[in-house]
Amino acid sequence: MPLFLPNYATLKTLSVGLTALLLLGCELNGAQSTPVAPPDFGPNVLIMDPAMASEEIQQRLDKLFKQQEANQFGPERYAVLFKPGVYHNKVKLGFYTQLLGLGQFPDEVMLQGGIRVEAAWHGGDATQNFWRSVENLSVTPDNGTMQWAVSQAAPLRRIHVRGNMLLDDDGGWSSGGFIADSLIDQQVNSGTQQQWLTRNASLGSWTNQNWNMVFVGVEHAPAGDQWPTPPYTVVEETPVVREKPFLTIDHQGQYSVVVPALQKNSHGISWQAKNTPAKVIPLSQFYIAKAATDTAITLNAALAKGKHVLLTPGIYQLNAPVEVTQPNTVVLGLGIATLMPVAGNAALKVADVDGVSIGGILFDAGAQNSEVLLQVGDNKRDLRHADNPISLHDTFFRVGGAHVGNATQSVIIHSNDVIGDNLWVWRGDHGDGIGWNVNTSKHGIVVNGDHVTMYGLFVEHFHGYQTVWNGEHGSVYFYQSEAPYDVPDQASWMNGEVNGFASYKVADHVTHHQATGMGVYCFFNDNPSVKLNSAVEAPKGANIRFNHITSVSLGGTGEISHVLNDLGERANDQNYVARLRDQ
């Protein structure tokens, strides 16, 4: 049975009372309380305490940002943990850096000064501001506005912004993004953002738009009845979701991981309720992994003993897959922890069991081709997990960019009822190890399981179909995809006699499927004469439903001839954007 976490006011009252009793006991017995030794998270986890001098905290944060501001493909990874309290600091956030509040609720950690992500390192263009995150704290921006100019793989979760938010940098392009379970007191200005998913949030208001702005289970979402002018897609309730597990500390210094309970038909944030259902797992039940010393052997040994796994920041080179076989296991990454197969193996395999939660991990393909990087379930079965599904949170995949990488598919989902919550699946289009015949990959994600639900599915640049959906009763809320940029010529990219491979392919045998808020883009910069026949391919049927699909030729560089099957206008150099409302 889930535990119930008290709200912040109750928790504070209980904490004060308990502290007084403990102090009284010490005085009566003449004893001193013994502080709990902190866990060994390794050198790349920085723990901030409100008792520290603000100047010391600021120096550490500034030094970290200076190192990570433009470190797009570097090996360094960091997590910054804030113990409950008030901090008078301004945080600039660079690559591979995660900010985490350690309270039970966001308002227990208050950053009085703000958090800022800008794109000065890239000339104001934020389309490459990836791989960073903020979770479980409140922010009071000193100028009234929190700037979060990001693109993919830069989620915000369980945050309270006491002011406004701006999602671009002085008009430079940005291509995000994801906010979940968060409260923004005033206005969110999306600026130049090409697309954005807001899920289970509460907003003051929202302004601006571009092509595909999706709101699912959001309080005070903008009106969505005038799509595509503006292009707001609004879904009142989130059908089924489990929020991402998060790390906390209590007043005695004991660490735990909180696993929120499954929610159905939810609206707004989870943590304003008086009692938030969740399971609390002491950190003693976790194996704290270190990239410098841990291997697939040590990680699998810990998992076989029934341990959960906390991956501290770093790059874990694996010559065999990490295998999760026990139900309800949590594998949680800190600081964009990275799993990299080095022997043509999968990085992580999850058995077809109940309640596994995977979150905060970057899967980075190795030079030797892997058939898959993440596999969920061994094969397609009839076993259901509707009451306790497997969930994937902030799981990111990269094929090329930091180095040569190859993977036939990045993700295969065989299990039923899986929930995906912010996945970016990316065949690199810039960096090292990039080229049509260099970082090769057929598909981004293949879904074989039934009743799989995705919130925020970003899949880009693969050689074949970006997404292949073979399972029944699939649901997607927000989809963003780009065709491969580097197609050398049309003859090199043909699906039989059809020009190119659709981004989103629903198998011909599927009879039940629905997707809402989709954007598919092309930018054939190596050969602008290349054409993609259709952004989305799917069988026709009464229970196959698509709502609000947009195709875009970025700068008119190439053509998407149809939006869905043979429907919809061309997106090309004469007509950049094409749309279909409901099909």
Image (cartoon, rainbow, N blue to C red):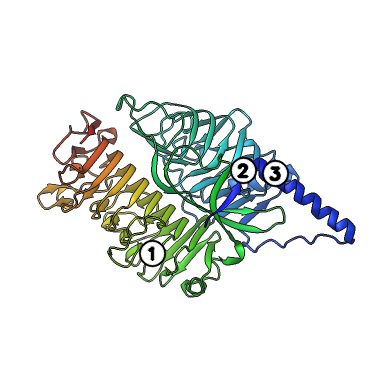
Read off the residue under disc 3. 12
Q: Nearer the viewer, residue 458 or 437?
A: 458
For the C terminus, the image quarter is: top left
Q: Is residue 165 visible?
A: yes
Picture disc at residue 7: 2
CA–CA distance in space, label 3 to label 1: 48 Å
Check if mark 3's residue and mark 1's residue have beta carbons within 8 Å.
no
| Label 1 environment density (alpha carbons within 10 Å; few <14, some 14–19, many ≥20) | many
**Secondary element at tag 1:** loop
CA–CA distance in space, label 1 to label 2: 45 Å
Amino acid type, label 1: Gly
On the image, the x and y values in percent for residue 280 come to 57, 57
Residue 78 is left or right of residue 565, and the answer is: right
Q: Is residue 532 visible?
A: no
Q: Is residue 397 above or below residue 301?
A: above
Of pointers 3 and 2, the one earlier in the residue sequence:
2
Read off the residue under disc 1. 366
On the image, the x and y values in percent for residue 220 come to 46, 29
Of pointers 3 and 1, the one earlier in the residue sequence:
3
Amino acid type, label 3: Lys
**Secondary element at tag 2:** loop
The residue sitting at the front extreme is: 1
